[in-house]
Image (spheres, rainbow, N blue to C red):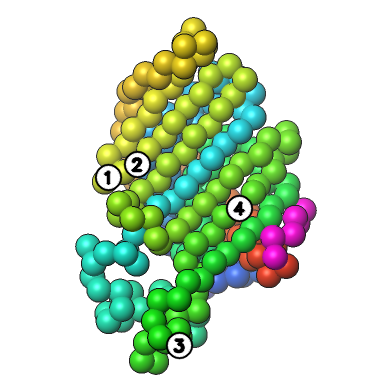
Amino acid sequence: MPFLAAGKHVLCEKPLATNAADAGAMADAAARAGVVNTVNLSCRNVAALQKAAAMVRDGAIGTVRRLKASYLQSWLTQPAWGHWNRESQWLWRLSIAHGSKSVLGDVGIHILGFATFIAGQDAVEVSCRLATFDKAPRGKIGEYALDANDSATMQVVVANGALRTVAATRFASGHLNDLRLRIYGDKRGLEVGFENFVSMLRACLESDLQRAVWHDVEAPVKPATYERFIAAIRGTDVADPDFARGAALQRLLARAEQSAAQKGVDLAF
């Protein structure tokens, strides 16, 4: 906020703030300051996602009717990144008192940003369920109470009535840090994958629908978030996603948390 008040351009990590109210205040301050502002939703850098989003915007798959997105991690089932049950860089992520925002707050903003960007439709309703699994005797390791949620599922309704299913988990054995998305229109279907840092895009085109044949689609690499931020400062590109987008996603996360607290009740915006 002091940087914005001083008229400085700002690139902020995700999530934009620790709650929706603060994120909204940051977006408002950035708009008033008239500076370049970007939130680092790094999943936007996935080439297949950018290509798929462009295809959807151009009407290549028709009207979007269904979307399924998932963020798959497995660091609670294997030590590829370290031993979660004895290393503080992982244990804090499982403890609300130590600052964890749980799986929903940690990677939920990535997968929601992933799912809403590609289809170009804002959410109007959300329901959410969260799960926290037993991971240690009495749910505690040393000073860390392991009370942060480990898995999240969401049903999101968008402006045109289409339904999106969004999920995130730390128990997806066999997946280190992978994103998957399937989006179906009334003319064609697309599948996006980002697994082991490899970006993949497949499409079932109109002529192939009857036989359900899928083809690989080439997706050129796009500039990264920080490169677009610098280009926006130079006036050669537009900062995207901006703080307003980050704040909108944080409001969606807040509504999802409220829904989960009410056992998955549908909440409108």
Q: Which residue is mark 3?
A: 138
Above or below, 185 against 103 in this view is above
Q: What residue sits 40% from the left and 52% below the top? A: 72
Cα gap from disc 1 to disc 3, whole angstroms: 37 Å
Q: Are discs 4 and 1 less than 8 Å apart at CB? A: no
Q: Secondary structure at mark 2?
A: strand
Residue picked out by circle 1: 197
Q: Secondary structure at mark 1?
A: loop
Magenta segment includes 265: yes
Mark whose residue sits in front, 1 or 3: 3
Residue 235 visible somewhere in the drawing:
no
Residue at (49, 34) in percent of width and height:
182
Q: Which tag, 3 or 2, sits closer to the chain's start? A: 3
Judging by the rendered image, the residue that carries numbered circle 2 is: 194
Q: Main secondary structure of the magenta part?
A: loop
Which label lies toward us, 4 or 1? Answer: 4
In the picture of the structure, the residue carrying the numbered disc 4 is 154
Amino acid at pointer 2:
Phe
Left or right relative to 21: residue 137: left
Q: Quadrant of the N terminus?
A: bottom right
Residue 105 image position (x, y, % from top left): 51, 65
Label 4, label 3: how far apart the Cα atoms are: 28 Å
Q: Quick one: SS at disc 4?
A: strand
Tell me which amino acid carries mark 3: Arg
Contact? badges 1 and 2 (CB < 8 Å): yes
Residue 143 at x, y percent in the picture: 39, 92
Q: Which residues are magenta?
A: 263-269
Q: Residue at x 58, y 16 (%)?
A: 187
